[in-house]
Amino acid sequence: MGNLMGSWRYKEPSTVEECDSTWGSDSESDEQPGDNDSGISDSVSPTDTGRCADPTDTSPQLSGSPAIKMKRSFYAARDLYKYRHSYPNYKEFRQTNDYRNLRFYLNKIPLVPDGIYIEEILNTWRGDYEKLEHNHTYIQWLFPLREQGLNFYAQELTQEEMKEFQNTREAKRRFLQAYTLMLDFYGIKLLDKSGNVARASNWKERFQHLNESQHNYLRITRILKSLGELGFESFKRPLVRLLLEESLCHATLPSMQHSALEYYVYTVRLPADRRRLLRYARQHYRPAHAFLWGPPLRRPGAGGGGGARAEPTPEKERKGREHNPLPRGRRQMGRQDSVESGAGGRGGARTSREGSTERGRGPERGGEYVETVPL
């Protein structure tokens, strides 16, 4: 089993801002005029995808409830920082690599402890939503990670196994079948080999279930991470884009808003892709002033375009601290990004059957949002 904590020499990020490089190279040139980043094929009719809500709509949404004081989760930001950077200082202690995940996908060994082979799952489980909902041992085998889940019979991926998996056509073919199996469970269909997705014919029933069965949000985080590890990084953005649209525009998945913004977007490794997703989300998030995910606030009169600011001289820094320790915009960001709850992992935590530490998804502890952390 690998050591995700790393050695003492590795200095972990200590704030959300240190974990989040999304806006570090902010440039409006990321957005090309007419760029269609929806992840939905042009062949899909408007009746299948719907239209986004009017930006001037002030109808209440989950994100805008005055009773909930939303904050960025440091624990989530740190977890996804490690994932995007391939687990800095991660050490694989396993002496021999038996490629158990790859052998499972080659139909040579069954998943443990259930003793089921991948071909049986792919051929008989599609549409069996009760089994997919209530069985909690298969997800770690279908979507392996370099992290240990609660099914301790499932083995963590290693870098060598990831490379071998990505070069094995049969394994990748079955992995895509497993992905479409879970998409169908969530009411989504895969449209093409580029990863574009859209609502499936059963979307109303499945979206209603997904909105009420929030442990599946942890599964979706695992699926997105696994896509990136096994050679399907480009499949993430279309799925995240669709989930943002459904949760923010159509209110079909209102319970998913925070998970989509706090977790799903940040599984995407390319900062430019994350910026596109967050700009889209900011456009439709209500109330707009409560959007926490950037871009960073600029001081009044600062130049646009997101370019680097001129470095202040030591004299200017000293005078600035005397008159105003932090500019108004930075004070606001500091309040949002200083949340480090969950770093210790104690105090009322409960363990999810999907292999994560859950701290609830609602307003607790005096209005502070206490997050669910998928692992």
Image (spheres, rainbow, N blue to C red):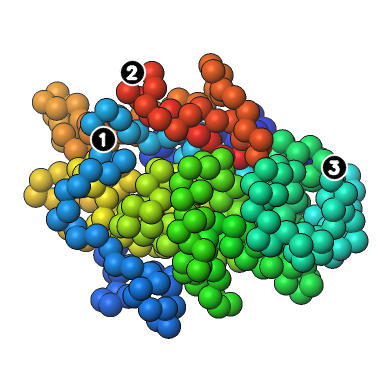
Q: Earlier in the sequence, mark 1 or mark 2?
A: 1
Residue 74 tag number: none
Name the foreground residue: 10 vs 82: 82
Q: Quadrant of residue 179?
A: bottom right
The tag on residue 65 is: 1
Q: Which residue is the extreme one toward the bottom?
A: 43
Q: Which residue is mark 2?
A: 366
Residue found at the very far left of the displayed protein: 301
Quadrant where the N terminus lies? top right
Q: Nearer the viewer, residue 216 or 193?
A: 216
Give how far across and how far down residue 309 sits, in percent: 23, 51
Residue at image x 47%, y 69%? 198
Q: Within 10 Å of the Cα at label 2, are there few (<14), some (14-19), or many (20+) other Cα atoms?
A: few
In the visual, does 62 lie left or right of 3? left
**Mark 3, residue position:** 113
Q: Indicate the amino acid at tag 3.
A: Pro
Question: Is label 3 or label 2 in front?
Answer: 3
Q: Residue at x 32, y 57 (%)?
A: 250
Image quarter (top left, top right, bottom left or bottom right) of the C terminus = top right
Q: Are marks 1 and 2 in contact (CB under 8 Å)?
A: no
- Which amino acid lies under the numbered mark 2 shown in the image of this protein? Gly
At a point 59% along the width and 31% down the height, the residue shown is: 357
Q: Could you tell me how far apart the alpha carbons at marks 3 and 2 are, in whole angstroms?
A: 42 Å
The answer to which of 127 and 331 lies nearer the viewer is 127
Q: Picture coordinates of residue 126 (x, y %)? A: 68, 62
Amino acid tagged 1: Ser
Could you tell whether 158 is left or right of 43 in the image?
right
Q: Earlier in the sequence, mark 3 or mark 2?
A: 3
Q: Is residue 112 left or right of residue 309?
A: right
Q: Is residue 3 above or below residue 363?
A: below
Q: Give coordinates of residue 199: x percent, y percent.
A: 46, 66
Q: Position of residue 347 (x, y in %)?
A: 53, 16
